[in-house]
Image (spheres, grey):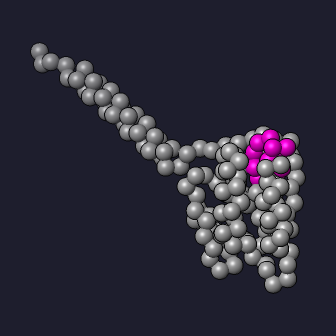
Amino acid sequence: MPPFYGVYILRYIKWIFILELFIVVLLLFVFLSLYPLNFGYKGTGVRLTVTPSVEGINIIHDTDILLIINELYALGLKEFSVNGVRIEPYTYVRCIGPSLMINNRKITSSSLKIKILGDPDYILSGLSLLTEYLKSKGFSVSALSLEKLTIP
């Protein structure tokens, strides 16, 4: 009587299934490492709006944004965004004509909306010198304390 080969075929199919499952998990891991899921950060904070107010100045340059970003880092703040683009330690800001590039995202430089998570009193007191400096450079600066703020 010949041996029954069905047992070997079932074992082979089982190992193929385990291998396919391993490949799917590996691909999912690679995909999530390249495109991490980020549901945003929520909490209290401040929305800072910077717009040019002097005639002849209608754009905000990258040096102005970098000045604001460096001031926020100096205050110890880590969760903030500029016009909906999350700012991280290795974020780059470039001025290209009348528009700005922040992490390969083109944003308009006519007005900046900066969302900052943290204690609103601390943020407003820490940014008081910066707002005065920006006003002296010809920018209109307004800060609004918000109870619910979401950063991408």
Front residue (pair 105, 7):
105
Residue at 70% across / 52% down in the picture? 72
Can residue 124 be seen in this snapshot?
yes
Residue at 66% across / 69% down in the picture? 63
Vertical arrangement, residue 7 with respect to residue 133, above or below: above
Spot occupied by residue 94 in the image (x, y as percentages of width and height) = 60, 70
Spot occupied by residue 142 in the image (x, y as percentages of width and height) = 87, 60
Can residue 6 be seen in this snapshot?
no
Spot occupied by residue 137 in the image (x, y as percentages of width and height) = 80, 72
Question: Hey, which quadrant is residue 84 in on the image?
Answer: bottom right
Quarter that holds the N terminus: top left
Front residue (pair 14, 57):
57
The magenta stretch spans residue 118: yes
Q: How many marks?
A: 0
Q: Which residues are magenta?
A: 115-124
The magenta stretch spans residue 105: no
Residue at 35% across / 30% down in the picture? 18
Front residue (pair 125, 65):
125
Vertical arrangement, residue 28 with respect to residue 91, above or below: above
Question: Hey, which quadrant is residue 110 in on the image?
Answer: bottom right
Vertical arrangement, residue 29 with respect to residue 63, above or below: above
Spot occupied by residue 108 in the image (x, y as percentages of width and height) = 72, 71
Q: Residue furthest left?
A: 1
Front residue (pair 2, 118):
118
Residue at 41% across / 39% down in the picture? 26
Q: Going by the image, does 24 lie left or right of 128?
A: left
Q: Residue furthest bottom?
A: 56
